[in-house]
């Protein structure tokens, strides 16, 4: 989502006749767009400001979730002129001009203004072959470890018409793969492009939205992320089975495999309910693959409860996953919990979990040996004539070619498999 937001900030400033440059040494304006999920985010921000600021710098703006969560610290920092939240970057050109013209020395803009933000953003111009499109922002789940409801606000779903229009524009200028993004995409409930009898507002869920997007000309591949387990429906599973353009790969974070910890996290599901959904999904869509997120060392987590997470991983069989030590976030319920786990124990548990996850990842990579897959190539490798692309499972696929493959879909036969990527040849 921060990649998407950063691109939209560039679009907004470019439309207002600001020019993006590659070298920070020559920049009049430095904009830092931040994430507050991990610890020490503010300290890293200050370090980056100190490293990049020069005598030429006239304006420093800090946006995103750190600006929202650490508003007093950020706003009072002597080097920062503008502090703006994730929902107010559409007003950034106006704020920068006010600083440059000397109208104001400091500006704080942290309103939750999603509908106005999206309606104010310009058309997108500088795009890649694979693009993100925000369909939903914010969260109503209030997991006890998470700052998102406080930094991104409550759930907001963009109208269907606006999403379809944006995707059509992207496809018309070269995008081939679209990823629908949001904090909880499968809780999407956007206003439909027509009104029901009685003038009552009609809404679509993500299942209906995907079916509409899948029919658009030029779309080769469709993804979405991130999903919440408790909101995942049988209907969405069936959409996967019946929609060829929708990839057979879903990110469904579970965070823990222990029921007591899941309840403390306020996740709204048990470990078995989660596993049952994966099993049902595999019955409906046999080629589906999953990834997940995990937090180890949540307050009061015992060795036995951590082992329950390892057992869930062994049963779920993920293609790839992301795992982290619990990180205390200010003003969240978990930060106030008694029984914080020492860092050395977190480190040991994380090492055990990551080794378990890696076994399944390597196993899946090797299962592709000898198979042919369609790959979208999006970047150049380190070696000469080397290109890297992604398959439907988000795996990196490396090939060598005399032809420029960037932006192309090609069939690749997989010849070798490593821990984090596979290699093959064009067929």
Image: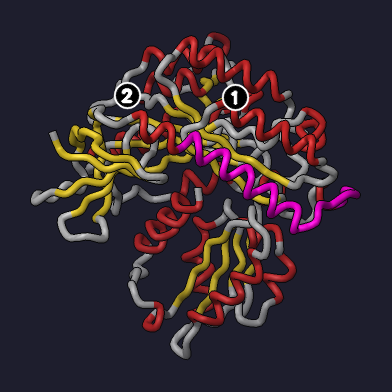
Instruction: Report the front residue among 165 and 152.
Output: 152
Q: How far apart are marks 2 and 1 (CA)?
A: 28 Å
The image shows residue 320, relative to residue 281, as above or below, that is below
Left or right for 189, reference 273:
left
Location of the C terminus (image quadrant) = top left
> Extreme bottom residue here?
55
Residue bounds of the magenta highlight: 336-361
Q: Which mark, by number, is residue 245?
A: 2
Does residue 367 show up? yes
Farthest residue toward the right? 338
Residue 343: say if magenta: yes
Q: Residue 315 carries which label?
A: 1
Above or below — where is 118 with respect to 165?
below
Q: What secondary structure is marked by label 1?
A: helix
Say if residue 112 shows up in the picture: no
Q: Which of marks 2 and 1 is in front?
A: 1
Q: Residue 425: x percent and y percent?
A: 17, 40
Mark 2 / mark 1, whichever is N-terminal: 2
Which quadrant of the structure image shows residue 295? top right
| Residue positioned 64% across, 53% down in the render | 37
Local secondary structure at mark 2: loop
Give the percent coordinates (x, y) of residue 220: 27, 30
């Amino acid at each position: 989502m921060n990649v998407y937001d950063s691109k939209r900030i560039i679009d907004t400033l470019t439309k207002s006749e600001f020019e993006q440059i590659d070298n920070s040494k020559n920049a009049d304006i430095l904009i830092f767009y931040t994430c507050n999920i991990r610890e020490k985010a503010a300290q890293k921000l200050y370090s980056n400001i100190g490293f990049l600021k020069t005598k030429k710098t006239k304006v420093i703006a800090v946006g995103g979730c750190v600006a929202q969560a650490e508003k007093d610290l950020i706003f009072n920092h002597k080097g920062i002129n503008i502090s703006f939240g994730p929902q107010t970057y559409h007003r950034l050109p106006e704020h920068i001009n006010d600083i440059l013209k000397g109208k104001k020395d400091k500006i704080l803009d942290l309103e939750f203004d999603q509908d106005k933000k999206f309606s104010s953003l310009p058309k997108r111009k500088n795009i890649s072959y694979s693009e993100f499109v925000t369909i939903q922002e914010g969260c109503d789940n209030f997991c006890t470890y998470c700052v998102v409801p406080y930094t991104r606000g409550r759930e907001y779903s963009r109208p269907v018409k606006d999403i379809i229009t944006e995707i059509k524009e992207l496809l018309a200028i070269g995008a081939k793969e679209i990823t629908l993004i949001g904090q909880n995409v499968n809780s999407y409930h956007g206003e439909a492009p027509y009104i029901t009898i009685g003038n009552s507002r009609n809404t679509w869920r993500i299942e209906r939205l995907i079916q509409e997007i899948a029919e658009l000309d030029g779309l080769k591949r469709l993804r979405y992320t991130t999903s919440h387990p408790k909101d995942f429906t049988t209907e969405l599973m069936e959409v996967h089975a019946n929609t060829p353009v929708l990839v057979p790969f879903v990110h469904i974070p579970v965070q823990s495999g222990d029921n007591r910890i899941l309840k403390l996290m306020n996740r709204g599901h048990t470990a078995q309910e989660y596993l049952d959904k994966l099993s049902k999904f595999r019955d409906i869509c046999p080629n589906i693959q999953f990834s997940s997120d995990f937090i180890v060392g949540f307050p009061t987590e015992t060795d036995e409860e951590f082992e329950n997470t390892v057992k869930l991983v062994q049963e779920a069989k993920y293609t790839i996953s992301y795992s982290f030590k619990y990180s205390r976030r200010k003003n969240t319920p978990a930060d106030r919990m008694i029984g914080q786990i020492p860092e050395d124990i977190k480190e040991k548990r994380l090492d055990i979990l990551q080794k378990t996850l890696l076994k399944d990842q390597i196993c899946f990579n090797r299962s592709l040996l000898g198979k042919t897959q369609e790959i979208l190539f999006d970047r150049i490798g380190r070696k000469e004539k080397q290109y890297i692309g992604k398959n439907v499972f988000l795996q990196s696929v490396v090939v060598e070619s005399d032809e420029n493959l960037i932006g192309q879909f090609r069939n690749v036969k997989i010849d070798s498999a490593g821990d984090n990527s596979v290699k093959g040849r064009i067929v």
